[in-house]
Image: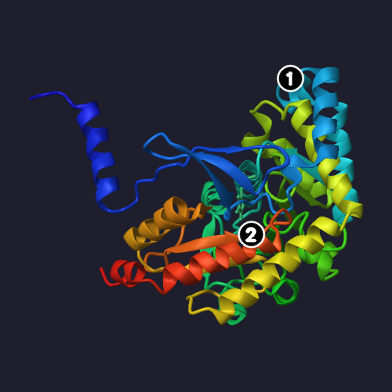
Amino acid sequence: MTSFNYSAHFKHILQSTHENGRFRNFLPLQRHVGNFPNATSTLPNGTKKDVTIWCSNDYLGMGQNPIVMNAMHKAIQQYGTGAGGTRSISGTTQLITQLEDSLCDLHNSESALVFTSGFTSNEGSLGALIRLLPDCVVFSDELNHASMIIGIRNGGAEKHIFRHNDIEHLEDLLKATDIHRPKLIAFESVYSMDGDIAPIADIIALAKKYNAMTYLDEVHAVGLYGPRGGGVAEQLNIMDQIDIIEGTFGKAYGVMGGFITGKKELIETIRLHAPAFIFTTALPPVVVAGALASVEYLKTSSIERDTAHANAQHLKKHIAKADIRTLQGQSHIVPLIIGDDACCKAITSILLNDYNIYAQPINAPTVPKGTERLRLTATAAHTRDHINTLMNALNDLWSSHEFSKIMTG
Ligand SMILES: *Cc1c(COP(=O)(O)O)cnc(C)c1O
């Protein structure tokens, strides 16, 4: 008997990943301060070209904000590079405590906890919370992000998936569950791939009726929604009715890291029981300083938010007028539905090669098969000229012979 061939095994996996269209190439992309949303890309053949990014989550251009950059320059001069340890072993800097205080103020909550990313905050918090609730039942929106799904799975409790944003389905599932069992409803505010927004108030009402806890991922909303950037729940004035709000510093805040906020006993419990928090080195002071500066800045500056939303509305208006299949959500995200992974890849390559427009194809398993798409985001850094150039390119390509050839195979 021959022994197991590891190399052949993994080569086989890569080959089938290629064959089922799930292989991913990353486009090398150099952003330059002051030049976003334009950037220099390096194409597969090695040539460099300037492109306009239409798929960034740096919604407010905070990645090149001078106040945030200054705070980070200062922090590295003052505190050096890494944190030097986990939060419990020498990694709790004053800056990280200040950032948590700033988040309590933002979300009007008792307590906040900073993680190294939005992913780890979801994974760690949901896992710990669910594990610690006796005989817990979890209700999870079917379009929840992978980090929530993995956290819920780690929690190991009974789980029910409700149809996306479907309040009636959620109520049916809640009704069918013993009222005495602890329950947790996990959902997002802005769904990043469809661009729609959850009926947060209705979900809160159901949570009250059936005595369930609520866990809300506001990753695509913090910084961008609400008068101070507190998210959709702030905009609706219902932040205090959510048990846990989770967010990131990596998207609208333009830096990196994640967090949760909520009642003291909840956040303290997660702090003491989430391995994804406990057993990892704290964020470096330089990153924390950037996140803090960004959060504080966006509490009072609305110009970035107003510009980003105005740009998104402008883009949506033009897309609606064009002969282009899209999803009409209430958020800033504009998904263009293509419906096939090979077509999606072909169209994004043409946009990149012929029109200098960078929009990454979003294929399965990130979105359901048959709904492959381009996910466009108009940021505060885009101008009306950028939008006009994009619309000309889309109208041109979508009405071309090449496009119909791609779509009909
Ligand atoms: C990106 C994302 C996360 C993860 O946040 P990171 O800070 O990038 O790790 C969590 N939830 C949702 C909905 C996301 O889109």
Tell me the crowding category of disc 2: few under 14, some 14 to 19, or many 20 or more residues within 10 angstroms, Cα based: some
Name the residue beneath numbered marker 2.
386
The percent coordinates of residue 47 (x first, y second) are 43, 36
Q: Secondary structure at mark 2?
A: helix
User: For the residue carrying disc 1, how many other residues have a C-alpha within 10 Å: few (<14), some (14-19), or many (20+)?
Assistant: some
- Secondary structure of the residue carrying tag 1 is loop
Q: Residue at x 74, y 71 (%)?
A: 204
Q: CA distance from mark 1 to mark 2?
A: 37 Å
Q: Which numbered disc, 1 or 2, marks the residue closer to the eye?
A: 2
Instruction: Please report the residue visible at 64 percent of the width from the left and 28 percent of the height from the top.
Output: 279
Residue type of the residue flagged with mark 1: Thr
Residue 151 coordinates in the image, percent (x, y): 57, 48
Please identify the quadrant where the N terminus is shown. Answer: top left
* Image point (49%, 67%), residue name: 394
User: Which residue, given by chain and number where applicable, does mark 1 sit on?
Assistant: 81
Mark positioned earlier in the residue sequence (1 or 2): 1
